[in-house]
Image (cartoon, rainbow, N blue to C red):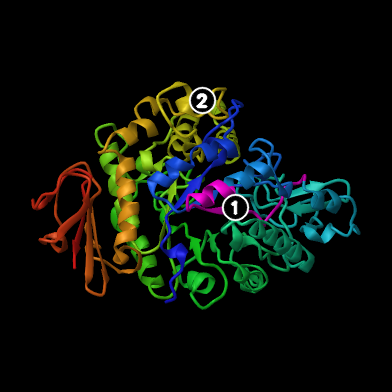
């Protein structure tokens, strides 16, 4: 295996709208992010992935792009972005941008032209089809509720949008579309950015016959052809990292997308572990109890399948997922810090590149706004109206599901200190701050040596000292255990054992962790006792 810098990196995901506001308009911005670079450097991360900051009408918080070459006015200017790039690089921090090329905004010049007439030169940049007997071309439903097709009276055809109707899908079969995207990508890389996180990138290859299609398009027939072309024309010419968001992938598919010799992408985000608590029909809007053996089995399968052949990305949460301490941990005050540290260690000591979502290093929790009117996320609002208005789900059950699963759980403003609005803004925040900010905030965490923040800082430092953390082989040691997760990492003569208790009750130390190995890290004072305390994690080292 040829080693690359992105394998040894720790990525920190910034949701710019909610990170730091510098001008009092209630919206985070690039100057605010610049103000917080010292904080990120002190945490010990090495890459910042920014959610989209391009010009956008903001139907889906920036994932509906109207100009790929401009910065959204809410966030600042291109001069602000250049300053961010310079300031980040001066601190040894790399910048990864979000690449959203499955779709554009309906306000993008390409789509404005495309909808004018059937013979417009840009018509074929998007997917237009005739209907069937007054119905859409097929029965696809969008990911944001409702049909995936919208009728446009001007040309009496439907256009495809897998997401919002303001997010028409691009036609990747059109070579001009692909070349325009590659040119745009080169423009950002030539500015000096260090990589791309690629939004829903395994959905770009649509079936040729959309009329008869029944399954939403993932991993389509031409996907590898497109990604290899992208690599050949753009990616291979830069020292950069790529990670593709790829729902519906298996480890076998990942070897095709990210294998060390496939010349496509460096890593992908798989979603299998994110569906461990989902209902088979209503998905995340009817959360189900999850089991630790199931979660372990999923994560361990990916660890084993990719070892030596491809590279894992490691994440518990992001801008689309609820807060991990509320989901897989225990966010009650007496257990929040311990369980947040435990979850961090279980993830960061696996093989792969770890991703920290903003506020995760503080143990930030889900929010439970009492009224639907307090939510801003288009997916949440659409699902509420679809399921409640149809009578399929009661308002009470839906609000409980939203408190568990809504994307806004991750999007409440970053909690910097105990002052008004958590130090995020001097104005009115675009989305309300989680009320627990007076207890949970960065200022308090940095002042407390026993905080989640300092634990994450230690993990990031250890990664630089012990190659076994990055490159060691993974072995699950207690697959059937219902309450503990124990695994080993080995590299040459070095061995790590991680043992974690996922419950609030003491558990026997797994047999494999009953060693006299030195404790490298833990969330309690070190002990030889053969009982794991509530949410305890021990990282043991032997060389």
Task: Report whether 437 appears left or right of 81.
Answer: left
* Image point (48%, 34%), residue name: 398
Please name whichever residue, 191 or 98, is drawn nearer the observer in this view of the structure. Answer: 191
In this rendering, the label closer to the viewer, 1 or 2: 1
> Which percent across, then down, holds residue 503?
23, 45
Camera sees residue 159: yes
Mark 1–mark 2 CB contact (< 8 Å): no
Q: Residues within 10 Å of mark 2 (few under 14, many from 20)?
A: few
Pick the quarter of the image with the N terminus.
bottom left
Q: Look at the image and say whether residue 363 sits in the magenta stretch.
A: no
Q: Earlier in the sequence, mark 1 or mark 2?
A: 1
Pick the quarter of the image with the C terminus.
bottom left
* SS under mark 2: loop
* Image point (56%, 66%), residue name: 239
* Image point (21%, 58%), residue name: 481
Task: Report whether 251 appears left or right of 161.
Answer: left
In this figure, which residue is indicated by the disc labeled 1? 98
Q: Residue 371, labelled with which disc?
A: 2
Q: Is residue 280 above or below residue 303?
A: above
Q: Residues within 10 Å of mark 1 (few under 14, many from 20)?
A: some
């Amino acid at each position: 295996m040829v080693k690359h810098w992105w394998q040894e990196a720790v990525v920190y995901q910034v949701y710019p709208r909610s990170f730091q506001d510098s001008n009092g308009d209630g919206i985070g911005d690039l100057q605010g992010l610049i103000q917080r670079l010292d904080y990120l450097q002190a945490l010990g991360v090495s890459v910042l992935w920014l959610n989209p900051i391009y010009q956008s009408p903001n139907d889906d918080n920036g994932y509906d792009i109207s100009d790929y070459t401009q910065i959204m006015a809410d966030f600042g200017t291109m001069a602000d972005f250049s300053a961010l790039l310079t300031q980040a690089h001066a601190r040894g921090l790399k910048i990864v941008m979000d690449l959203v090329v499955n779709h554009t905004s309906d306000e993008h010049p390409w789509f404005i032209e495309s909808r004018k007439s059937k013979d417009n030169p840009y018509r074929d940049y998007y997917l237009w089809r005739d209907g069937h007997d007054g119905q859409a071309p097929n029965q696809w439903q969008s990911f944001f509720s409702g049909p995936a097709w919208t009728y446009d009276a001007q040309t009496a055809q439907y256009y495809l949008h897998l997401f919002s109707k303001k997010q028409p899908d691009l036609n990747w079969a059109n070579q001009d579309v692909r070349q325009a995207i590659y040119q745009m990508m080169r423009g950002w890389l030539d500015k000096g950015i260090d990589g791309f996180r690629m939004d829903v990138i395994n959905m770009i290859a649509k079936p040729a016959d959309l009329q008869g299609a029944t399954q939403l398009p993932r991993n389509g027939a031409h996907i590898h052809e497109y990604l290899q072309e992208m690599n050949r024309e753009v990616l291979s010419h830069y020292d950069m990292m790529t990670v593709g968001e790829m729902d519906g992938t298996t480890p076998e598919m990942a070897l095709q997308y990210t294998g060390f010799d496939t010349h496509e992408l460096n890593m992908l985000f798989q979603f299998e572990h994110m569906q461990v608590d989902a209902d088979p029909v209503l998905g995340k809007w009817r959360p189900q109890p999850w089991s630790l053996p199931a979660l372990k089995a999923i994560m361990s399968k990916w660890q084993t399948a990719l070892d030596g052949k491809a590279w894992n990305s490691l994440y518990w949460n992001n801008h689309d997922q609820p807060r991990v301490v509320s989901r897989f941990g225990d966010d009650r005050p007496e257990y929040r810090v311990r369980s947040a540290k435990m979850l961090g260690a279980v993830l960061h000591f696996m093989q792969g590149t770890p991703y920290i979502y903003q506020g995760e290093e503080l143990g930030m929790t889900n929010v439970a706004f009492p009224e639907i009117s307090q939510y801003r996320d288009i997916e949440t609002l659409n699902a509420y109206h679809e399921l409640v208005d149809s009578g399929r789900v009661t308002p009470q059950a839906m609000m409980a599901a939203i408190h568990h699963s809504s994307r806004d759980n991750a999007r409440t403003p970053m909690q910097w200190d105990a002052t008004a609005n958590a130090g995020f803004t001097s104005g009115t925040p675009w989305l309300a701050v989680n009320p627990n900010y007076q207890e949970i905030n960065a200022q308090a965490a940095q002042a407390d040596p026993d905080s989640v923040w300092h634990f994450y800082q230690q993990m990031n430092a250890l990664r630089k000292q012990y190659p076994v953390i990055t490159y060691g082989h993974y072995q699950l040691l207690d697959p059937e255990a219902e309450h503990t997760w124990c695994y080993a990492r080995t590299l040459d003569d070095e061995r790590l054992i991680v043992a974690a208790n996922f419950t609030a009750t003491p558990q026997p130390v797994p047999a494999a962790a009953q060693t006299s190995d030195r404790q490298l890290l833990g969330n309690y004072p070190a002990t030889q006792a053969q009982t794991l305390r509530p949410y305890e994690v021990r990282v043991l080292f032997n060389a």
